[in-house]
Image (cartoon, rainbow, N blue to C red):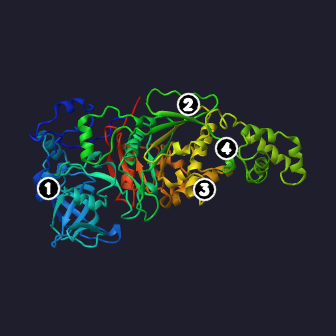
Amino acid sequence: MSDLGDFTEFDGDEDGSADDESAANAPVDADRTDDFQEVDVDPVSAEHGIGVLSAADGLTISEDEDDTRLRAYITVSNRSAVRIGKYLLVPYPDGERLFCRITALEYAPEFRADDATEIHAQRAMASREIDEQDFKFMATLEPVAVLYSEDGDLKRRMTDRVPKPETVVRQADDPTEIKTGLKIPAEGVFLGHLSVGGERVETAAQPPTIDYRLKDDYADGDPLVFRHTLVAGGTGSGKTHGAKNVLRQYLDEERAYPVESGSDRTVSPALVVFDPQDEYAQMHDDGELPEAFKRRCERQGVAYGGVEDTVAFVPDVEGASYAADHHRAEQVPFTIPFSMVYDNPWLIASSGLNDNQYNALVNVLLPRFKNEYGRNGTYEQFTTFLDDPALREELDESGKVHEATFDAVRRRALGFGGVFDQDARPITDLVGEFVRPGGLTVVPTYHINDSRATETVVLALASLLVDEKLSNDPTFDRIEETPLILGMDEAHNFLTDADTVQARKVIGKFTDAAKQGRKERLGLFLITQDPQDIADPVFKQINTTVVLNLGDEDAISAVNIPSNLESKVPYMEKGQMVVYSPDNSEPVELKGLATCVTKHGR
């Protein structure tokens, strides 16, 4: 996963000569734009325009998009450079500008003539040249915003003015104009570079690319990390590569958030990632980063390099052995104590309980067991407790739990002996190490062959973090006081909608977490190739959706992005992405970095 597009910037010495050694160490990829390419913007297009507005079919700006008519005639010399999706500017007489986007291109006949004849065809084939003078090349434009200056600052507002006919239309080539027109923040977390049709938008500035950033302070709302992110992409789309590049930005040593509203005290976020493919612990290591790439990262404010404070917390599960030679992160084994079941009874009912059975477990059996064995009762003791025929008979005769219900609970609660109370230290004793400000905790589950065990481990840990964040009386101050980003790869396996009572409990828990994330400094970072399987109540709380290549129609429909971008998703190359974040910017297409900023790949 290395073909993600890089910074397009000339990186040379003061005399203009390129750094030969850095160039030699740069990754070679014939399919991507040269990282050292110098960009020349056509001065005619930039300064004198590419055409003029036409009122031949009417010129209308309307509140109703269907009534808006905005078309430009493109001159012959500029036609080959015009693309759907390009951003243009149309000036008003008083200096304001209409920022717009090309949505359609059309050749229209200039005169009443039939060029689809044998004679015309033979002449054209013989000359091997196309005479465009006889045709009008028309671009249909979508108005995005009106740009205006106020107190020396460039600002935007809704489109409320119609420009004059025959106004010169020029390509937007200034980074400030483009960012303002698209409402892209000047500062924040780097995601990639603005692109159109897979090609990065290039300007006359240096660097020539437009960096796209997510808002990450409280000056205007909330950091979007605490309003949750979804990364969706199919196999081979580059989603893990891209996710690493984004998550690395949140571990920048200078990034910190206030621990409560109005507080001057800031704390660096802790990042916990559930990793079913054992890839994220590699973020401990630098990888082979060319020096030239590092310098460009520094100039453009992009965090790079391995995160020294990366620890792999390895679940101790019976029959599962973890061995990793592809990363150098510290490894800490842990086990899930049965005591966590008291607060999350559905952990021992993952095979399904109906409402009656669940109520028997929660309201009768677990309280009775806790009363007899105490807070530190083990799973083995609980199964012995359920094997007592006298208990079964007593509860049935008292009318508290019918014998059939008791038997059903017992059957479904069995089979978790390999998950709870193993030889490693309980995770509840390791919370201070598990959640570390500025640190990355990775929970690999690739080594666990039992899917039910994997599900139990992940949901137990995630619920511990969420419950502590949402609690009015938390047990662990470290979790409460630390901004937390909870990353979950293959999230569809854990947050899927279902009819079982425990599924409803899980979805309800994470929905509450998503709703209160802004207040509690809790951000969900979900990664999936099946977004259609994410439960709708959780999905609705996602503010930022990053979509890479998806081939499944149901998956594409589920991400709910604008139709003009949705149609591009199946054809996007590795690393191309669509970002839909209404509180951050207009929907845009981006191209990520070709180089992963940490180690990636075995």
Q: Quadrant of residue 352?
A: top right
Classed neighbour count for the residue bearing mark 1: other residues with Cα under 10 Å, few (<14), some (14–19), many (≥20): some
Tell me the residue at 21%/52% (across/down): 82
What's the amino acid at mark 1? Ala
* First along the sequence among labels 1 and 2: 1
- Mark 4 and mark 2 residues within 8 Å of each other at the beta carbon: no
Q: Nearer the viewer, mark 1 or mark 2?
A: 2
Please name whichever residue, 384 or 181, is drawn nearer the observer in this view of the structure: 384
Q: Report which residue position mark 1 lands on.
A: 46
Q: Quadrant of residue 596?
A: top left
What's the amino acid at mark 3? Gly
Left/right placement of residue 388 relative to residue 520 reads: right
* First along the sequence among labels 4 and 2: 4
Q: Nearer the viewer, mark 4 or mark 1?
A: 4
* Label at residue 508: 3
Give the percent coordinates (x, y) of residue 281.
Answer: 45, 36
- Mark 1 and mark 2 residues within 8 Å of each other at the beta carbon: no
Please name whichever residue, 573 or 333, is drawn nearer the observer in this view of the structure: 333
Q: Report which residue position mark 2 lands on.
A: 447
Q: Secondary structure at mark 4?
A: loop
